[in-house]
Image (cartoon, grey):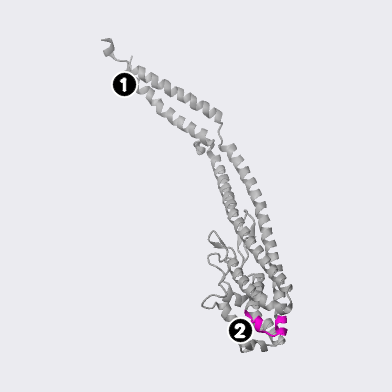
Amino acid sequence: MRTNALSTLSFWSAPRTGVARMQADIARGNEELVTGRFADVGLALGSRAGFTVGLRQKSAELSALRDGNAGTALRLSTSQAALKQMQETADTALKTFTGLPEDKRAGALKAMAANQLAGLTSLLNTSVDGQFVFGGTNTGSAPMTAYTASPASPAKAAVDAAFLAAFGVTQESAGAGAITADALSAFLDGPFQNLFDDASWAADWSGAGAAPLTSQISLTETVQSSASANAPAFRKLAMAYVMASDLGATNLSAAAQAVLGDRVAKGLSEASGGLVTLQADLGRSQAAITAANTRLDAQKSLFANQIGQMEGVDTAEAKTRVDRLSTQVQISYALTAQLRQLSLVAYI
């Protein structure tokens, strides 16, 4: 017959062996109470853990798209505000122009058009969060250079050179009064209009990307999220302002002024219509983003429910388990204290 050796030390150590395990279980239980999910998802779900990881990745993609849509919506609203201001300015100029007698139109519109051309440049250089909203795909730099910059901007230099080549005088020269209506009409339809075609606009006026910026708003959908400064509406508006402010309107003959006035009015009207179209296009993008956000939120909610069903814990059960373990730990501490009092010295 064999007996095992017992000692006070072994009695002291026995309760402490289980305390460390119970304290670890308490920590896991508290974590589950706080997070609402298993402390060790892999251990709890086993092979199904990979499915929840996939769901979380998809949910993260949706969240990234949702956050990106907020920036896109801000860019669109900023663009819309600028476009509306451009359109209202063009409409005001046209109303002012047509409301004046023919002999007073040139002088009244010249100074106003110069200011509005500067305002157009400023609006086309609008930026938000460090990105130029009318820069097209080139959002990192301002698309427009001021027409009246010093030294002369490429656009201003091109207009001056074309006018001088066509008529042999500068716009501000008194000799501009000798320009006939037919000669001015041919100039406006030819060399001057060519200054605003695709190649000349890109070379002398705009540094914007060739295409407007597009943004992905859902897993399967992209929309136009800006208007490029290269859009025809902007070119027509700039052309109308330059005609009114920098083609020697006040020095031209009455017949030539009439021709110029008709072209300015036509340009402002067409530009205003083009700006309305741009606003409508961006408005459709805004509506698409609103609809996409609704779908993204619904998908995220669905994923969250699926993840919760798989990873979620019964908080009531977890609370009961933590309380039970805490009680056991306290009992273990009390038992250890009692065992420490066991000593032969106390009985000698």
**Can you tell which quarter of the image residue 223 is in?**
bottom right
The residue singled out by tag 1 in the image is 9
Q: Is residue 78 left or right of residue 277?
A: left
The residue singled out by tag 2 in the image is 172
Q: Main secondary structure of the magenta part?
A: helix
Q: Residues within 10 Å of mark 1 (few under 14, many from 20)?
A: few
Counting from the top left corner in percent of width and height, residue 2 is at 33, 16
Front residue of 251 and 237? 251
Q: Secondary structure at mark 1?
A: helix
Front residue of 148 and 270? 148
Q: Amino acid at mark 2?
A: Glu
Quarter placement of the N terminus: top left
Q: Is residue 294 visible?
A: yes
**Can you tell which quarter of the image residue 217 is in?**
bottom right
Quarter placement of the C terminus: top left
Counting from the top left corner in percent of width and height, residue 80 is at 64, 61
Q: What range is drawn magenta here? A: 246-259
Counting from the top left corner in percent of width and height, residue 327 is at 46, 22
Choose mark 1 or mark 2, whichever is in front.
Answer: 2
Q: Is residue 8 above or below residue 313?
A: above
Q: Is residue 327 left or right of residue 85?
A: left
Label placed on residue 207: none
Q: Going from the N terminus, do you reach mark 1 or mark 2 first?
A: 1
